[in-house]
Image (cartoon, rainbow, N blue to C red):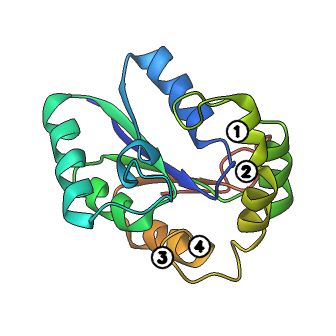
Amino acid sequence: MRKLIIFGNSSSGKSTLANAFKQKENLAHLDLDTIAWQTTAIPTRKALDESKRDIQTFINTHSQWVIEGCYSDLLAISMLEANEIIYLNYPIKTCINNARNRPWEPHKYPSKAAQDANLERLVEWIGQYDARDDTFSRCAHTKLFNGYTGKKSEYDNPNSSVISER
């Protein structure tokens, strides 16, 4: 039974890769964006305990799954049940290009125009990946990857082979 975690910077391709695994292996798919935020006019993170319950419900409901996101606090909870992780450790420029070319994500935005209205703020945020030390940072993701003792793979660009596999 595959229990896979995919993580990396925003717009690194986590959802695309997770969807490929979902289709190929018939895995249940959880995008952490869908459980991390309250549905309020001004986006606010849910309490960690609330998101943790949502993760546990998902894991308990499905025997094989893929969970993806950039929230190292939520990923750490998910990794307790995972048997494999993939870290998309791509250059910031790659992620920014992906963001600029991203198709509409209807589960996140009511329209393509609403998504595009947020684009410059997203690009700025993506660009701060190395400077931040929060749950979304390269520092937090690298620490998560290095601390995981199960099967793990790291990629440094979308066209590469695995740069680190243990």
- Mark 2 and mark 4 in contact (Cβ < 8 Å)? no
What residue sits right under mark 2 in the picture? 118
What residue sits right under mark 4 in the picture? 137
Identify the secondary structure beneath mark 2: loop
Which of disc 4 and disc 1 is earlier in sequence? 1
Identified by mark 4, the residue type is: Ser
Identify the secondary structure beneath mark 3: helix
- Mark 2 and mark 3 in contact (Cβ < 8 Å)? no
Measured Cα–Cα span from mark 2 to mark 1: 7 Å
What residue sits right under mark 1 in the picture? 114
- Mark 3 and mark 4 in contact (Cβ < 8 Å)? no
Identified by mark 3, the residue type is: Lys
Identified by mark 2, the residue type is: Asn
Which of disc 3 and disc 4 is earlier in sequence? 4
Q: Residue at 33% across / 64% down in the picture? A: 76
Using a 10 Å C-alpha cutoff, classify the residue at mark 3 as few (fewer than 14 neighbours), some (14 to 19) or many (20 or more): few
Q: Is residue 130 above or below residue 92?
A: below
